[in-house]
Each structure stands twice: as structure tokens, then as C-alpha cells.
Image: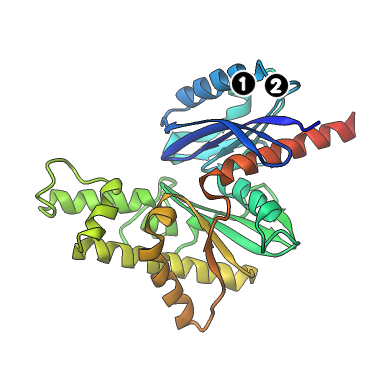
């Protein structure tokens, strides 16, 4: 009989939850806009867990969340105003819980289910949404590093000359330059300077696809710059990890793949490095499925101890 896990994928833009079994089959999915305060996140998780637990025998909980998750499961996420936040302790759930970075969870899922990457391959998954993060898989195993924060590609320094800071205060890092949050800040600044006056409200990231469809030159330039910065970050990753493929997920990638992918590839080609660049094979469900794998591993580890 397959076990079931209550799972969450919490990013800077979307809060997703569901129930997943050992084979990666999802049910009970709920999606809404992410809250940005720890207390709200704790409240949502608690209510959803208690509701789903009524119909699940011996539930385990897996939480994939954007931000740095250290080996002690403390979370630092600027998007959700968490800084060394003891999420598991604050939740006080009655069931076993594991917390994992959302990109690492997605990497776990791709390593298990991706048709090309599931056979002990080495690859890197990069998420580009409100923030930028990564998960590194080496010979089929997720690499977490000494303190559990390996793969934070968003904080690779790309250009210190840029007056751009991420929420952790790093200047010129990939997250500060090319994340959804960075692009939205630049869009809003341009709108305040008089661009896109036809919009009756302050421009937002969700307006970018429409601006591109209309042939807007400024929007195209923003995407070109972001793509080239991401390409520079990917090139650094390739130099260090030598992966067989780079897999992308996240809002910016899924919404703007056709526009942004060519610029990433252009940077790699300029260094005479061409490796496959692809979108997640599991789509928007990849984080939930990965959170389920993390919860499954927790169950197995507890069973070995018992």
C-alpha cells in the first residue's frame, strides 16, 4: 500500500499544497498567492495539514520553500521575511516534518522522474521566479554541502558595478540582477520615470509578457539583459559542476522561455560551451513532488532507526 504525504511548495509568488504518494501522484492541490509574513505561512500550513491529515494514515509532511534552508531546518528567505526562522519549531505539528529548499526539492523530483536524468546523471536545476535558487545533483544524488545550503546560484556575484542588491544585501549577484523581484523593481522604476504611461496603474512583473507581445523595446531590453546575466551565472555553474544539462523552473522561465532562453544560450556559445537547457519535465508540480520525496526519505530514515 502506497504511503501519502502532505506537501507544500512555497515561493515568493505562489503557495502550493497537495497530497502525494510514493509514486509521485498528486491530489488535493491548492494554489494561491504567497503570504509574505512567517505567521501567515505557519497558519496556512497548519490548517492545510490538519485538514488533509483527517484522511491519511500516519502522515508525513514535506515543505519545499524558497530561500536558504540550513541543516538545522532554519529558513532564511527575504521574500517571506524569514531570517534564521525555526519553521518546524514554530509549526508545532503532531506529525514528522521535513523542510527543504524549493530548488533542491525540484532537483530531487527531476533526478527520480526526468526521462533523461533519472539514471545517476549529474545536472543542475535552477529556479528563476521571485528569487533565483538552485539544486545540484551529482551522479544521481542531491548534493547539499556542509551546512545544507549548496546550490545557491542566485548569490553568485555577476557584476559588482551594478547598483543592485538582493534581500540578503549582496551587491550585483544573480538574484539582485535577474530575478523576478529585480525585474519588477526595474519595471516600476521605469514606469515612475514616465514609460508605459498608457497603463493606468504601476506596472508589475505580470505585465511583462503583454509588453513583449506588443513589441515594446524597453521590455525586450530588460529580458535580454536578464537572459545574459543568467547565462553568465550558468556559465559559472558549468565551470564548477560540469553538468550534463541545466534544467529550469519558475515563473520567469515558464512564462518567458522563448524570449529569454536564446540569450542564455548565446552567452554559453560565446564561451564555446553548449549543453542542453530545458524546462522542468514535471512543470509546476515539480516542487510538490520533490517535497514528497523528501518526506518519503524522512519516513525511511525513521524506520531504519526504529
Q: Is residue 145 visible?
A: no
In depth, the one of 105 and 21 nearer the eye is 21
> Who's the residue at 64% across and 54% down the image?
110
- Residue occupied by mark 1: 52
Q: Is residue 195 above or below residue 270?
A: above
Disc on res. 56: 2
Question: On the rendered image, what quadrant is the N terminus found in?
Answer: top right
Disc on res. 256: none
Q: Is residue 77 above or below residue 241?
A: above
> Who's the residue at 70% across and 40% down the image?
294
Question: On the rendered image, what quadrant is the C terminus found in?
Answer: top right
Q: How many angstroms separate mark 2 from mark 1 (CA)?
A: 7 Å
| Left or right: residue 2 compared with residue 36 | right
Q: Secondary structure at mark 1?
A: helix
Q: Position of residue 183 (x, y in %)?
A: 31, 53
Q: Position of residue 122 (x, y in %)?
A: 69, 65
In depth, the one of 131 and 160 nearer the eye is 131
Determine the image quadrant of residue 255: bottom left
| Left or right: residue 208 compared with residue 3 | left
Amino acid at each position: 500500500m502506497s504511503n501519502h504525504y502532505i506537501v507544500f511548495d512555497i515561493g515568493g509568488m505562489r503557495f502550493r499544497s497537495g497530497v502525494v504518494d510514493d509514486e509521485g501522484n498528486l491530489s488535493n492541490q491548492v494554489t494561491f498567492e504567497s503570504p509574505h509574513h512567517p505567521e501567515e505561512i505557519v497558519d496556512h500550513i497548519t490548517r492545510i495539514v490538519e485538514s488533509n491529515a483527517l484522511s491519511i494514515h500516519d502522515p508525513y509532511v514535506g515543505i519545499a520553500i524558497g530561500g536558504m534552508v540550513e541543516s538545522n531546518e532554519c529558513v532564511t528567505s527575504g521574500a517571506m521575511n524569514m531570517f534564521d526562522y525555526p519553521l518546524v519549531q514554530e509549526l508545532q505539528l503532531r506529525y514528522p516534518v521535513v523542510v527543504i529548499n524549493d530548488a533542491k526539492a525540484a532537483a530531487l523530483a527531476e533526478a527520480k522522474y526526468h526521462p533523461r536524468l533519472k539514471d545517476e546523471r549529474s545536472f543542475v536545476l535552477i529556479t528563476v521566479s521571485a528569487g533565483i535558487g538552485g539544486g545540484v545533483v551529482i551522479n544521481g544524488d542531491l548534493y547539499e554541502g556542509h551546512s545544507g545550503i549548496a546550490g545557491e546560484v542566485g548569490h553568485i556575484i555577476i557584476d559588482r558595478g551594478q547598483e543592485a542588491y538582493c534581500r540578503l544585501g549582496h551587491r550585483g549577484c544573480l538574484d539582485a540582477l535577474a530575478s523576478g523581484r529585480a525585474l519588477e523593481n526595474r519595471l516600476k522604476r521605469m514606469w515612475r520615470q514616465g514609460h508605459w504611461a498608457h497603463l493606468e496603474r504601476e506596472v508589475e512583473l505580470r505585465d511583462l509578457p503583454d509588453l513583449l507581445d506588443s513589441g515594446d523595446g524597453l521590455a525586450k531590453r530588460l529580458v535580454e539583459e536578464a537572459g545574459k546575466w543568467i547565462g553568465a551565472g550558468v556559465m559559472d555553474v558549468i565551470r564548477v559542476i560540469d553538468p550534463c544539462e541545466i534544467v529550469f523552473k519558475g515563473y520567469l522561465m515558464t512564462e518567458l522561455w522563448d524570449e529569454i532562453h536564446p540569450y542564455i544560450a548565446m552567452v554559453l556559445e560565446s564561451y564555446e560551451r553548449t549543453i542542453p537547457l530545458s524546462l522542468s519535465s514535471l512543470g509546476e508540480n515539480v516542487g510538490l513532488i520533490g517535497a514528497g520525496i523528501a518526506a518519503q526519505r524522512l519516513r525511511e530514515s525513521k524506520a531504519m532507526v526504529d
